[in-house]
Image (cartoon, rainbow, N blue to C red):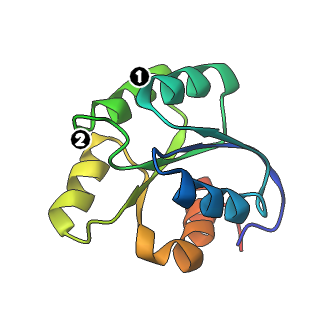
Amino acid sequence: MPEKHLSCVLLADRHHGLTEGVRGLLETAFGTVVMVADEASLLEGASRLRPDVAVVDLSLAQDGGLEWLRAVHQRCPALKVIVLSVHDEETVRRAAMEAGADAVVLKRAIVTDLLPTVARVRGDQT
């Protein structure tokens, strides 16, 4: 778990119920948590806010593709992106990583894995 409050995280997920729970967890490590629910808002928020980290549902795009991930990195190359997924298959993780994700966290393990993953991708000492 990060020891200091980081400035801003962008949380993108179409599922409001899950987003609220994840937001509460991220608020323990970030000063500001900005929530968005679609690809366009993710891209605009990343460009405008320049968050430290983006935590994004793998299925954010309606078409299920990963172009949003490539677009985020084109706009904000230094942004660390953690992808949330219900899919436990190695091919899904590999596809997300190849598209530019810095890490993948399974939704069933958010409570135990998300904050340590945030610390790892940021290079924080824990």
Considering every residue shown, the one lying at the far front of the view is 17
Res. 89 image quadrant = bottom left
Q: Which residue is mark 1?
A: 74
Tell me where residue 50 appears, x and y as whole percent: 66, 28
The correct choice, above or below, for 84 with respect to 79 in the image is below
**Residue type at numbered disc 1:** Gln
> Residue shown at 54%/66% (left/top)?
117
Residue 87 seen? yes
Residue 37 image label:
none
> Residue shown at 72%/62% (left/top)?
24
Residue 76 seen? no
Q: Which is nearer the eye, 124 or 107? A: 107
Q: Which residue is mark 2?
A: 64
Res. 86 image quadrant = bottom left
Q: Residues within 10 Å of mark 2 (few under 14, many from 20)?
A: few
* SS at circle 2: loop
**Residue type at numbered disc 2:** Gly
The correct choice, above or below, for 121 with respect to 112 in the image is above
Q: Quadrant of the C terminus?
A: bottom right
> Residue shown at 69%/26% (left/top)?
49
* SS at circle 1: helix
Among numbered discs 2 and 1, the one appearing first in the sequence? 2
User: Comparing marks 2 and 1, which lies closer to the viewer?
Assistant: 2
Q: Is residue 27 left or right of residue 84?
A: right
